[in-house]
Image (cartoon, grey):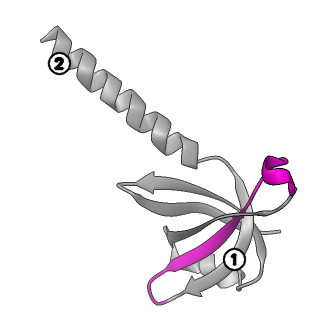
Amino acid sequence: MGTTKFILAGAAAISMLASSAFADDLTGMVTRIDRLNSTISIQQTQKGTVGGSAGGAGALQEYKTKDAAMLDAVHAGDKVSYSATDNNGTGTLTKLQKQ
C-alpha cells in the first residue's frame, strides 16, 4: 500500500512539473489563426544567445484557445506574449496579449 501511494505521488509531481513548464510567459509572432476551430499558430521567439542569433525564431506551435474571443485582438504577423498549458498533449492558451 505504501509503495503504491509513493508511485502515485511521484507520477502526480511529474505531471505537475511538465504542465507548469508550459505555463511561463512566452513571446512570439502569430503565423496563422483559425477562428472556426479556435486555434492559433505562434512562432516562439528564442531567448538569450542560443545559436548565436539573439531574437531568432524558435519552435512553431499550434494552440487551442480557452475562449474564441482571445483571437479577436490579434492578426497574423502580430508579436504577442502568451502563456499556455499542456492538456494531454494539446497546448491550450491561457493568456494572449498583443505587444
Q: Which residues are magenta?
A: 36-53
**Mark 1 crowdedness (10 Å alpha carbons): few <14, some 14-19, many ≥20:** many
> Residue, x 71% and y 85% (percent of image)?
75
Whether residue 74 is situated above or below residue 42 in the rendered picture: below
Tell me where residue 97 sits by quadrant. bottom right
Q: Horizontal placement of 91 versus 84: left or right?
A: left
Question: x%, y% of residue 50?
Answer: 79, 48
Q: Residue furthest bottom?
A: 36
Residue 99, horizontal then vertical, whole percent: 83, 68
Q: Residues within 10 Å of mark 2 (few under 14, many from 20)?
A: few
Q: Residue at x 57, y 77 (%)?
A: 40
**Looking at the picture, which amino acid does disc 2 mark?**
Thr
Where is residue 87, by image quadrant? Answer: bottom left
Where 25 falls versus 40 (above or below)? above
Q: Nearer the viewer, residue 71 or 49?
A: 49
Q: Is residue 29 left or right of residue 84?
A: right
Give the residue pinned by disc 1.
30
Q: Quick check: 57 left or right of 93?
A: right
Q: Which residue is mark 2?
A: 4
